[in-house]
Image (spheres, rainbow, N blue to C red):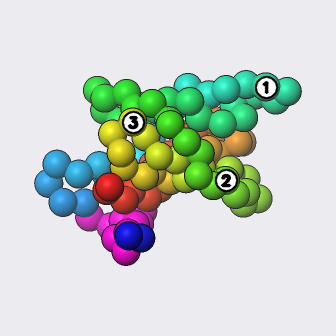
Amino acid sequence: MHSTKPYQEAGEKSAPGRHDLNTRIRAECYAGYRADQRPLRFSLGERTLQVLEVEDQWHSPHAIYFRVRADDGHTYVLRHDEETDIWTLEAFRSK
């Protein structure tokens, strides 16, 4: 059955115990012919999550967005600002 749970968008208050959105994260990336091609794992606070699948990727003028499924079963939207090399968590959807 298709999940109808909405994404929690950046700027929304998260429930207690949930991930804060629009906050900086650390990301380790695959670097092929160019740097930071796609995230392999990322850290939220003390927890490091393995990226199992990049479900989608899109570009804005100064950033690349990745919708990823992590090893905790949740889906995250990560943003990489290419000018500042800063990664942020932009959206989250629980499994």
In the rendered view, would you say 11 is above or below 28? below
Q: Judging from the image, what secondary structure is the residue with disc 1 in?
A: loop
20 lies left or right of 10? left
Tell me how far mark 3 sits from mark 2, CA to CA. 18 Å
Say whether disc 3 or disc 2 marks the residue closer to the N-terminus.
Answer: 2
Q: Amino acid at mark 3?
A: Asp
Determine whether, in the image, residue 78 is placed left or right of residue 36.
left
Circle 1 crowding by C-alpha within 10 Å: few under 14, some 14–19, many from 20: few
Q: Residue furthest left?
A: 16
The Cα–Cα distance between marks 1 and 2, rounded to whole angstroms, is 16 Å
Q: Does label 3 or label 1 sit earlier along the sequence?
A: 1
First to last magenta residue range: 3-13
Q: Tell me which residue sits at (69%, 31%) in the image.
A: 36
Q: Which residue is mark 1?
A: 32
Q: Secondary structure at mark 3?
A: loop
Task: Determine if the magenta segment contains residue 12.
Answer: yes
Would you name the residue on which mark 2 appears? 57
Residue lying at 72% horizontally and 35% vertically, measured from the top left: 37
Count residues near mark 2 (Cα–Cα under 10 Å), then give few for <14, some for 14-19, many for 20+: some
